Amino acid sequence: MTDKEVLNFSYTFRLKSGLQKTFVVSVDNSSLNIIYKKNESYPEWTKLQNFRCPHCELDPAVHEYCPLAINLTDIIKTFQDYNSFDEAEIIVETNNRNYSKTTSVQSGVSSMLGIRMVTSGCPKMGRLKPLIPTHLPFATLEETEMRVLSTYLLAQYVKWKKGGEPDWEMTNLINIYEDIRILNHNVSKKIADLEKKDVSINSLIVLNNFADYVTFTLDEKMLEDFETLFKEFM
């Protein structure tokens, strides 16, 4: 498959301990689903009946494994002996450009989980697929907020142009992030018992904080700040 058909995200972690580990996430550009390796085996705890969220839409009779859980196994195994605040040089390579930052392991893992969870096949996380092509590693809350809100409102404009009923108040976006908050809370609880230390759990907490932040912003709307920012458009 060509670069136009596949979005590649390569995360390389270089720790002071000497550990160097590269994770490659390949995503089908048409479906925005992660491309899985065939015939992979997964631990018992990743089965859907063991990892299921309270609001999960998947049928255990059809899906043996939780698609989100199987995307956590190699991360947990790699970083189980490290703390979330351990410093690392993290290099992210994508189809169009590369990024690098010396930061906490938690920051890099959180950024990578943002891709893996959304493209995993989990219906709840999959609602954020439109953000994948513009994924921004190490994004601040403000940067991600801007991407989320602008992408969602653009989708509503397209829907309106096609004759649909747009959600200008972004009510459904609030519901999406409430579902994600519940999911992140459940996943955090599930993996807490699997780790010797706290890297993956803290990375999920970062994502959960963002879910809370977006919901709060949508409630408050921050109209004055946006009005100042967009004054040239208004």
Image: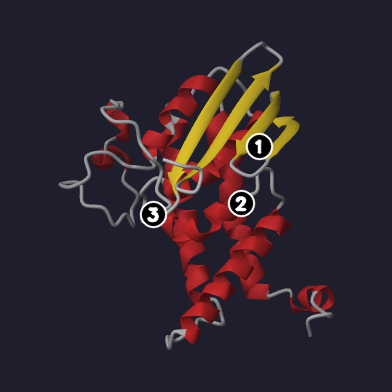
**First in sequence: mark 1 vs mark 3:** 3
Left or right of 192, for residue 46 = left
- Circles 1 and 3, Cβ within 8 Å, touching? The answer is no
Which residue, given by chain and number where applicable, does mark 2 sit on?
209
Q: Is residue 156 above or below residue 52?
A: below
Can the viewer see residue 196 in this picture?
no
Determine whether, in the image, residue 216 is placed left or right of residue 204. right
Looking at the image, can residue 17 be seen?
yes
Residue ID for mark 3: 31
Residue 185 percent location from the top left of the image: 47, 48
Mark 2 and mark 1: Cα distance apart in space: 13 Å
Q: Is residue 144 left or right of residue 204?
A: right
Q: Quadrant of the C terminus?
A: bottom right
Query: In which image quadrant can residue 220 be found?
Result: bottom right
Q: Which quadrant of the view contains residue 94?
A: top right
Label 1, on which residue? 107
Residue at the far top: name it. Answer: 18
